[in-house]
Amino acid sequence: MKVILETVDGSISKSKAKLLPICETVKNGKFPVFKSGPTNARPYINEGEIYELIGDKENAIANYLAATYLFVKHKFYKEAAEYGNRVLRLDPDNAEAKELLDQIP
């Protein structure tokens, strides 16, 4: 699987260039360690974005759902909506994302 991070003119954005070593690590099955905790959604978001970049939709969704769950649990509804909708963009029929989004007042 080839990860395409280039722009139309062939250049690579600085933010995406920083992800190249991480993407290669993920593709080789050696996932980087992210510090997680019971209230920290950031590692799930980071992993979800990396998986999405390398085309692993299933793992991206799993991580975005974990982040969405934490955001709903801790009443960060704007963020919960953002990542719940990101799941639905990847999988429009995802029942778990729909259920989490239904919990947002």
Image (cartoon, grey):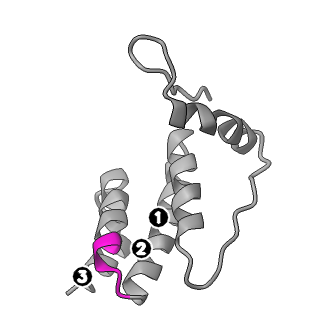
Residue bearing the label numbered 2: 68
Of the residues shown, which amino acid type is indicated by label 1? Tyr
Question: Residue visible at 50% across and 46% down?
Answer: 52
Image label count: 3
Disc 1 to disc 2: CB gap under 8 Å: yes
Q: Is residue 72 rendered to the left or right of residue 51?
A: left
Residue 16 placement (x, y as % from top left): 53, 34
Q: Could you tell me how far apart the alpha carbons at marks 3 and 2 are, in whole angstroms?
A: 12 Å
Element type at marker 2?
Answer: helix
Chain part drawn in magenta: 75-80
Magenta highlight on residue 77: yes
Residues tagged 3 and 2 counted as in contact (Cβ below 8 A): no
Sequence order check, earlier mark of 1 and 3:
1
- Residue 61's spot in the image, x, y percent? 47, 60
* Contact (Cβ within 8 Å) of mark 1 with mark 3: no
User: Disc 3 residue type?
Assistant: Asp
Image mark for residue 102: 3
Q: Nearer the viewer, residue 67 or 65?
A: 67
